Image (cartoon, rainbow, N blue to C red):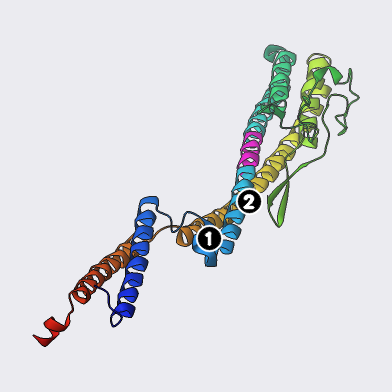
């Protein structure tokens, strides 16, 4: 029975019980969901920080995705340039052998030169996900068309432009690697090294058979091409390295962000269980107090 004398204590006990039961219910939800709250209002103090960190995380992950895609393209380019280097190195060896005791006829140099020219053309016309990698910003255009090669050469040849057979443009691509860093990357099929390799092979294809002057000039040109293509490969590697360094920094930020988000929104199971045990003890104690207050009477007091 609730009396005027114990009414206030009774109400306080009920309030404590209701609050503790609410915390118990909240704790059960937190444990089952793994989250501190189902809505931002449940973590009002940290809500703004959580939204900011989540926004930064999404933006960073998008940068990383773009960087990974670009790095894949650069890797394909570097692989093809390495193969081009191997082809022109083999071609240089053939030229040296052809000039040694006039072996050109036995080596069938025009046929071999055309085969190697076709191989280089295929390597420069490579596509990745529908994009021609060596066409500059004209990614939907095949960069090399052999029908545009000249019909003759004047010896000794000099480095010329590739406009006759190059259908792309010389504009390099750019990548916004993160908020404060932009990378200009890629090479185009009109690079001097590629032009030298193509010219050296084509002059053997269309030149007088086994002509020593043509063979000598072709050897000089392909020697220059080997140095130039090596530099091209180094530039691609430098771009890959720059992007990888950015992604390393971004990966560190992603780990930090995910840890922060977890601390802000995920339930600390051990802490919640400890608090729930304390609340359970408090509820049981409050019920015990209410039961004793209900049994208080003057008769019991006089006893």
> Residue visible at 89% across and 23% down?
153
Judge whether residue 292 is colored magenta: no
Mark 2, other Cα within 10 Å: few <14 / some 14–19 / many ≥20 = some
Task: Specify the quadrant that holds the N terminus.
Answer: bottom left
Q: Which is nearer the N-term, disc 1 or disc 2?
A: 1
SS under mark 2: helix
- Asked whether disc 1 touches disc 2, contact meaning CB atoms under 8 Å apart, the reply is no
Q: Is residue 50 above or below residue 114?
A: below
Query: Which picture quadrant has residue 134?
Result: top right
Give the farthest residue toward the right. Answer: 154
Characterize the magenta stretch by its predominant secondary structure: helix
Q: Is residue 203 left or right of residue 33?
A: right
> Residue visible at 21% across and 73% down?
294
Mark 1, other Cα within 10 Å: few <14 / some 14–19 / many ≥20 = few
| Residue 212 in view | no
The disc label shown at residue 59, or none = 2
Q: Which residue is mark 1?
A: 41
Q: Is residue 126 above or below residue 182?
A: above
Q: CA distance from mark 1 to mark 2?
A: 24 Å
| Residue 232 in view | yes
Near-viewer residue (197 or 187): 187
Query: Which picture quadrant has residue 24?
Result: bottom left
- The image position of residue 284, as x and y in percent, is 23, 68
Near-viewer residue (265 or 80): 265
Judge whether residue 73 is colored magenta: yes
Specify the segment rendered in magenta: 68-77
- In this view, the mark in front (1 or 2): 1
């Amino acid at each position: 029975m609730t009396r005027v004398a114990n009414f206030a204590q009774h109400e306080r006990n009920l309030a404590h019980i209701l609050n503790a039961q609410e915390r118990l219910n909240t704790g059960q939800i937190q444990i089952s969901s793994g989250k501190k709250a189902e809505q931002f209002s449940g973590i009002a103090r940290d809500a703004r920080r959580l939204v900011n960190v989540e926004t930064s995380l999404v933006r960073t992950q998008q940068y990383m995705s773009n960087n990974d895609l670009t790095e894949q393209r650069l890797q394909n380019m570097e692989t093809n340039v390495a193969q081009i280097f191997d082809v022109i190195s083999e071609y240089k060896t053939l030229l040296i052998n052809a000039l040694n005791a006039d072996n050109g006829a036995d080596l069938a140099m025009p046929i071999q030169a055309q085969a190697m020219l076709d191989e280089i053309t295929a390597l420069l016309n490579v596509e990745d996900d529908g994009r021609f990698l060596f066409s500059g910003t004209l990614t939907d255009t095949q960069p090399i068309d052999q029908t545009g090669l000249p019909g003759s050469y004047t010896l000794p040849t000099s480095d010329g432009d590739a406009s006759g057979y190059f259908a792309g443009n010389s504009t390099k691509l750019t990548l916004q690697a993160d908020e404060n860093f932009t990378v200009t990357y890629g090479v185009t099929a009109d690079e001097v090294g590629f032009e030298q390799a193509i010219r050296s092979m084509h002059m053997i294809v269309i030149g007088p058979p086994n002509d020593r002057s043509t063979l000598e000039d072709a050897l000089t040109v392909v020697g220059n091409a080997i140095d130039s293509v090596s530099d091209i490969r180094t530039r691609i590697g430098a771009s890959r390295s720059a992007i990888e360094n950015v992604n390393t920094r971004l990966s560190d930020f992603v780990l930090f962000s995910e840890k922060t988000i977890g601390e802000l929104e995920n339930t600390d199971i051990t802490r919640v269980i400890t608090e729930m045990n304390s609340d359970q003890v408090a509820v049981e104690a409050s019920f015990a107090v209410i039961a004793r207050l209900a049994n208080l009477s003057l008769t019991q007091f006089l006893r």
